[in-house]
Image (cartoon, rainbow, N blue to C red):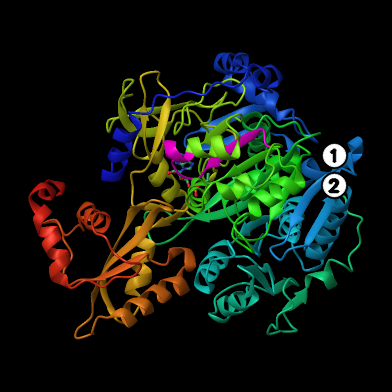
Amino acid sequence: MTESSSDNLSNLLHETRTFPPSGEFAAQANVTEADFAQAEQDRLGFWDTQARRLKWRTPWTETLEWAPPFAKWFVGGTLNVAENCLDRHVEAGLGDRVAINWVGEPEDDTRTITYAQLLDEVKRAANALTSLGVQAGDRVAIYLPMLPETVVAMLACARLGAAHSVIFGGFSAQAIHDRVTDADARVVITSDGGYRRGAPSGLKVNVDEAIAKGGTAIEHVVVVKRTNQDVEWDDTRDVWWHDIVGGASNEHQAQAFDAEQPLYILYTSGTTGKPKGILHTSGGYLTQVSYTHWAAFDLKAETDVYWCAADVGWVTGHSYIVYGPLSNASTIVMYEGTPDTPHRGRWWEIVQEYGVTILYAAPTAIRTFMKWGEDIPNGYDLSSLRVLGSVGEPINPEAWIWYRRVIGADRTPVVDTWWQTETGAIMISPMPGVAAAKPGSALRTIPGISAEVVDNDGTPVGNGEGGLLVLTEPWPAMLRGIWGDPDRYQETYWSRFQEQGYYFAGDGAKKDEDGDLWLLGRVDDVMNISGHRISTTEVESALVSHPLVAEAAVVGASDPTTGQGIVAFVILRGENVEGADTVAALRNHVAKEIGPIAKPRQIMIVQELPKTRSGKIMRRLLRDVAENREMGDVTTLTDDSVMNLIAAKMPTAASED
Ligand code: PRX
């Protein structure tokens, strides 16, 4: 366990408040205690029942085929994911229900899209992609801001049985290049640009740069017009979305695909410099996202207005903006911009205006709102809210309490949902109508899921003890592998507790005296910055690719708002003079190599890095240094001051070897 997670642990030991749902809420809740008992008795039977939420073209013959660590769920079943999210709702008479309330960043730039309209657009887009040669089994890259077209593009791929690979709009040309080459995508869907804090920024320009690097298989670039900014144009390759989709037929018959047809690849950081392409398939994934969206948020699709404030470029956006909510025929809000544009009350203005009933957000956002002060949300009518969710990183009790009190009027349940890109869907979360929630605890596994906290040998720890979180049984939305790298899949997740057959999540956790779970953050070299996973090695590789840098070590230091902040210790080559310019150049270099989210908060230029006798960098020491010093945004320290601090701590650290 890392230093910061044991600090978290001791803080959490003092948290004893509980918040049961009101009698009124419990009485109308979708999930009851009985569901847990039923799932416990017959886990596969439980998931069998949940899979019947979906429309299957061919029924499955076997619920689970498990050849560890490779799973197939709903074997022999066929379905079409897009049909499940659209056609069947329209057929059921829900065509006029609003699917997406889209809110652009510029004020008064909104769109309201019904299920019938969304289906129409997806059919056109599917025909357009077919005309570009996209077929079932292909990969399509999507590099777009938070637009309705992003959802349309994803569903059009799903409709065709082509896997999408959504690349977060904040990633750089290099990151796009790495992802489209790894996935061997032939088509990229992007936009001219997007709005960020009031200013248009370019997106196509990054795709152009990625393709110019060479080595990709990209044949077509489809471009959504969003900002109207000037773009370079290559007639042989580029085509406007409004031409090709606008001009396509809205007749399209969805074909049925195997339950294990790849649905998407989503890249996430691991402990090496190379991101992992996490593969998700269709039937099991859709079953679990659909069930969990209904269960964890107590969804009432006819009346709820549901807003997940994540970006669609991350797994939360895939599962809880697109596939979960739309498979449940719910009405969503989708917001393009940042919470402070054009003012710091923007989110609350949206909640008020659309009557949002369920809000799903990251602790980082909540802590930012806390910092801005409760007067801002207090200025809006938030009384429509009835369930609040949190995801992406540990939520500290203070933020949890603030969220419930200020945003939820001390009335709404708060569900702290633990899951990962790899798990595809929520795994550990209070059920809002059942649980007496504890601020900062994700409580227990949802029905049909089993987890354990174990010591290094894989032995379950007792109540009141901490250890490593493992998942002990396969689950429907589990990743089916790492794209193109079955060995890495086995090694990363299944080798640590091979004997027991446990999935190793990479997170520390604690069981409290009641056996409830408290998630404590990563135990590997993966950082969590504002709920985004970035590996220390990835940032180190970006730094050493700069000609000035000889060596670099990166740590995630705890940060009151973003959870962790990136701090880099850098040794320069030869006689290079350190200084603010060098630091600025290096920060920009990382932003260029990976994306602005990976820009180090601080860079310290040092002469040496503390290493063990075997040459391993002692990150714990560096983290101590990074966390204990008061520093500005960007600081260069001379070697002495850093090394003195490090030296002072040397005796205790020697045992790390
Ligand atoms: O460390 C855990 C943390 O986020 C990691 C997964 O990151 P990612 O794949 O990007 O998915 C984020 C959205 C699901 C986990 O290994 N994490 C996620 N949710 C929580 C959490 N840590 C504590 N509490 C949570 N609720």
- Residue picked out by circle 1: 89
- Give the crowd class for mark 2: few <14, some 14-19, many >=20 residues within 10 Å: many
Q: Quadrant of residue 504?
A: top left
State the residue in front, 84 or 436.
436
Tell whether position 389 is magenta: yes
Q: Quadrant of residue 94?
A: top right
Tell whether position 277 is magenta: no
State the residue in front, 126 or 382.
382
On the picture, is 136 further left or further right than 73? Answer: right
**Residue 157 place in picture, x, y as percent:** 73, 56
Q: Residue flagged by tag 1: what amino acid is it?
A: His
How far apart in space, not on screen, are marks 2 and 1 (Cα)? Answer: 7 Å
The reply to whether residue 583 is in sight is: yes
**Residue 643 place in picture, x, y as percent:** 13, 64
On the picture, is 656 further left or further right than 196? Answer: left
**Residue 102 place in picture, x, y as percent:** 75, 55
The reply to whether residue 261 is in sight is: no
Span highlighted in magenta in the image:
385-399
**Mark 2 C-beta closer than 8 Å to ligand 1:** no
Name, please, the residue furthest toward the left.
651
- Residue picked out by circle 2: 115
